[in-house]
Image (cartoon, rainbow, N blue to C red):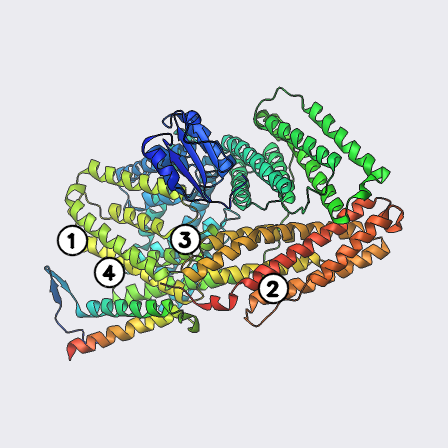
Amino acid sequence: MNVSHPEFDILGFLVPLSLVAGVVGFVIAWFIVAILERLRLTRYFGNISLFFIALSVLLAGLTDWLVNL
Amino acid sequence: MNSKQKPAAMVTGASRGIGLGVTPLIKPGYDMLGTSLSISQSKQLRLSSDRVLIDGDMSKEETTAKVAAAAIEHVGRMDWLANPDRRAFHLLQRAPGQPSEWLDRIFVLHALKMGLAGVLSLFVAQALRLQYTEWAPFTVMVLMMVHPHPGSIALKSLFRVVGTLAGASLGVWLVSDYVSSPILFLSVTFLVMGLASYKVGQLSSAMAPYGYFLTGVTLIVVESSAIARPDQAWSIALSRAEETFVGIVAVLIINSLFRPRSPRQEFQQLARSAVDQLEHLTNAELQNIKEGTASEVLEQQTAVLRKLLSLDSLLLAERRESLYFRANTAVLQKVLNSLRNLFQAVSELSRLAIDWRVLNGRFEKQLEAAQDLLKHGFANVGRTSVEDPSMLATAFQTLDDEINHWVRAGELQELPADQLAAYLRCWNSFRRMQNELLNLYDLPNQLQRYEQDTVPQSDPPKTQRKIDRRLVMVGVKGGLATVVSLFLVEWLHLPGPTIVPVAAWLAVIFTSYQIPSGRSGHIRAFRNLLLMALYGIVALLGLLVLTPFLSNYWFMNLILFCILFAHGYFASKTSGLAFWMLGTIFLALVLVALNTQKPVPFAEIVDSCLGVITGFTVGVTIARVLWPRLPQKELKEATARFCDAAQSALAETPAGSMSSINSTLSALPLDIARTTAVLGVNGFLRQEQAKWNRLIPVLMCTGDQLSRLTSIRGKFIDSQELGFYLDGLHQDFRTWMDALGRFFRQPDSQKILPSLQGLIDHLKQRLEGLTVADPSHPSSNGSAPETLIDVHEYLVTAELMRLCGDIASSLRLAEYSGDYFL
């Protein structure tokens, strides 16, 4: 994760990239798990919350990497 | 209440205008309740079996009362409102079992007291120039959140003082000596916090665990504040202890001086309303028996049960009102026992499969005469009566003698065996009800008699404490959340360092102990966390806007008062611990901690709010990932535990005392009922919820029956033939309960429960044999009906168990493994 990336300027507030990537990762993971829930597939996961956190971290890292490309 | 299954509609102003216009739109199959000024003279609308018409002005209290009574009596539910005005909605809000207006006033008073105590504590803390003034209103909020009575608050305060001193000393010792060796420091913190989290789980049964809770809170507060400056650990601990004392004094002063609530008085009011509700329940049950219907009485039973539970906690509160927290409350205990027995006797009626058509004239007349007497009995309880109770007792005795005469003369043989047994059991229930009603005679005056309170009372039996595996899990989570957040604060320098560990630990405690108090536990924990974060951001924006105004002392106090008032009002109306309460507590904490009398840097406000959110995130994540408590899993476990308790009750030598087994059997269905209420998340679980709602009353009845079987078994222990026969039955029941327990523990869609049909047929045969042969049977001790009733109890139990099995088989337990976490 590149922490030296300049912050985003949102209405005068400086928001770090890692925070934005974290939020994007969280939201996408949320959608994926919501779809899995709807299809009642989450019952095949031993610990859905652990899966959700892992997915959020993975997607946050992926977003960060994509922005830095 | 003859048509609870049928939907119902209410039309106000039904005799003309829009009201009359909409009446033809009511679908066939609906019951209708019409009101207007002169509806009875309406030519268009006529009274019928599915239509109730009531004259009166809806703006008047007596009309709304009349409508409410008619709705309960004839319709029993309300699905559709036509031409409604606000008053009609108001009326519907006051459904049976709902808190009435006087309770609302109590909530407002409680909220006012909390607001006043909070502002007073802050004033005193500031006047004494204490360092961290925010802990004084925090103490007020926590002390008054659950217990409204002065005695209970005083006891809680006592444990708060002890816990604070213990936590502060521990904190000073750890920070001063071990902060330089993090492994030791964090290990000891983990152990102490784990123990505190474990003990909080026992808070519902006793007040002492509250001391552990305070030890935990104080330890984290001291550690997180002093970790950066260990040399000041002493002064931080001292000021935290001082602020807690200031909060306690403020709460005690306000609660004792400003309209103190008396548990005894509330007990009286609630007991009377419980009797009224029991009367309604009796009427509904008798109606069911007479008409052969099976209208649901579950809602009313639950309402009565809830009242009995509240009476139990009021009794405890009354005990705490004395100086030694052990006041003699023999009269209240006696009344509560009578109400419990009365409820059991009334519930018994729903288990009787009496066929009214089989009973001929004299039996029917007998039951109706008894029903009349019970009606008088109920009337005598509520008000200071004009009737002499001995007259009613004599009248009932006459009926009783007549039945005994029939028994002796063998005149009861003309009834089929199962009907005869059911009839005699019904009569037994009536007798028990009559006895309890006589005990409760002239209730208002009975409860006034303080002199009877000198009767010494026996202590409740001490239960053997075993280590609870589920509490150990919460202990580990609590310890871990504290240690992780302290580690993050110390090494990652997160925002709002002093508040993160407290928020993390409290988040674990609040979410982990929710389910028993009727909340949803960790289901959807991340969604709640997200909502809480949004709430935090809104609070942050509000604080940013308000900060310039908060420098005005009066304005700041006003805002604090408003927050405390809202918290006090909604917290006292909510059952158990909700997540939003934690958010409001921290909002008040941040508001005071900012110390807005001085200019507050912008970063400090953002830091505090982010600190709370970060702490919650750490706590919720740990609590949700490690051994989450989910309603659907709790349901399976609780039912399996019920089966274990049932097996112990049926065993020849029960493991543990019979009274503790019986209390487990009666408490677990209530736990299951509370958990079922929070189950509905998606369509699948909502369907399952309906099945569980059918299962709960059956479990309740089964639990009650099983404890009765034990005493029957004890009665015939010397009778060789019957004793041997009953032993066999106990063994069969135990095997079946074991199978049911395994069915819930390891759900498998292929698994089938063993059938009970053979056993039921066999019991029916045995019953027939008893009716014919028993008057001279050596094993019956010469009292055939008694033996008949006893064996019939076994038949009823077997049928209840079969019903349990049928409902359990219809549950799709194997599919409960999903976490349903969004």
Q: Nearer the viewer, mark 3 or mark 2?
A: 2
Q: Residues within 10 Å of mark 1 (few under 14, many from 20)?
A: few
- Could you classify mark 2 by the number of other residues whose Cα lies within 10 Å: few (under 14), some (14-19), or many (20 or more)? many
Question: Upstream in the sequence, badge 1 or badge 3?
Answer: 3
Residue name at image x 82 percent, y 34 percent = B405
Q: Circle 4 sits on which residue? A: B495
Kindly report which numbered mark, 3 or 4, lies closer to the viewer in this rendering. 4
> Image quarter for residue A10?
bottom left
- Say which amino acid is labelled 4: Pro
Disc 3 target residue = B167
Along the line of sight, which residue is nearer the eye, B440 or B367? B367
Q: Is residue B509 above or below residue B279?
A: below
Q: CA distance from mark 1 to mark 3?
A: 32 Å
Disc 3 marks a residue whose amino acid type is: Gly
Coordinates of residue B440 in the picture (x, y in percent): 62, 30
- Dot 1 corresponds to which residue? B602
Q: Say whether disc 4 or disc 2 marks the residue closer to the N-terminus.
A: 4
Give the mark nearer the N terminus: 1 vs 2: 1
